[in-house]
Image (cartoon, rainbow, N blue to C red):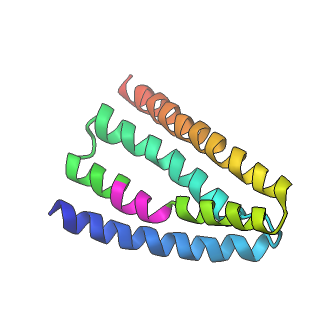
Amino acid sequence: MKFAYMGAFGLFGIFARYFLGLFVSRYFTTPFPYASFFINIMGSFFVGVVYVLGTEKAILNPEMRIAIMVGLLGGFTTFSAYSLETARLIEDARFWLAGLNFCLSPIAGVLSALGGLHLTRLLMSRGAS
């Protein structure tokens, strides 16, 4: 059943990434890859939330935690797009934007994951009091 959940959630993540990417690209029409950036940051935040709910608080069963983290968020986040977009910016001699994307995406992603972890822990501890 775990693989069926991963597949179904992965399919949802793929479509969510595609349509959110279209939406963001419609409003940010600069060479900087805002869509991939925002998607990766959101995915990083939610992986922190799901980790706390699934691993630390055991609110999600292991199959659902894996389905969400591997399927949904794996299908949703866009590391390969981040890599290609950064490479294309370098090829187009847009070194400032390439450097910005190269540095900002992983830093913001890790900070976002920490935010998801800490916010979920805080909310869960308030609910337990």
Q: From this viewpoint, which residue is outermost toward the top?
A: 129
Above/below status of 103 relative to 18: above
Residue 7 location, quadrant:
bottom left
Q: Exactly how many numbered labels are in the figure?
A: 0
Q: From this viewpoint, which residue is outermost toward the left?
A: 1
Residue 123 located within the stretch drawn in magenta: no
Residue 72 located within the stretch drawn in magenta: yes
The quarter of the image holding the N terminus is bottom left
Residue 62 located left or right of residue 99: left
Tell me the magenta residue range. 70-76
Above/below status of 128 relative to 107: above
Predominant SS of the magenta segment: helix
Q: Position of residue 6 (x, y in %)?
A: 28, 63
Q: In the rendered image, is residue 52 in sight? A: yes
Q: Residue at x 52, y 47 (%)?
A: 44
The quarter of the image holding the C terminus is top left
Q: Which residue is drawn at 53% across and 46% down?
A: 45
Residue 56 located left or right of residue 1: right
Residue 122 located left or right of residue 11: right
Residue 78 located left or right of residue 128: right
Q: Where is residue 51 in the image (x, y as percent from the top left)?
A: 37, 40
Q: Which residue is drawn at 72% across and 73% down?
A: 25
Q: Position of residue 99 (x, y in %)?
A: 77, 50
Residue 19 location, quadrant:
bottom right
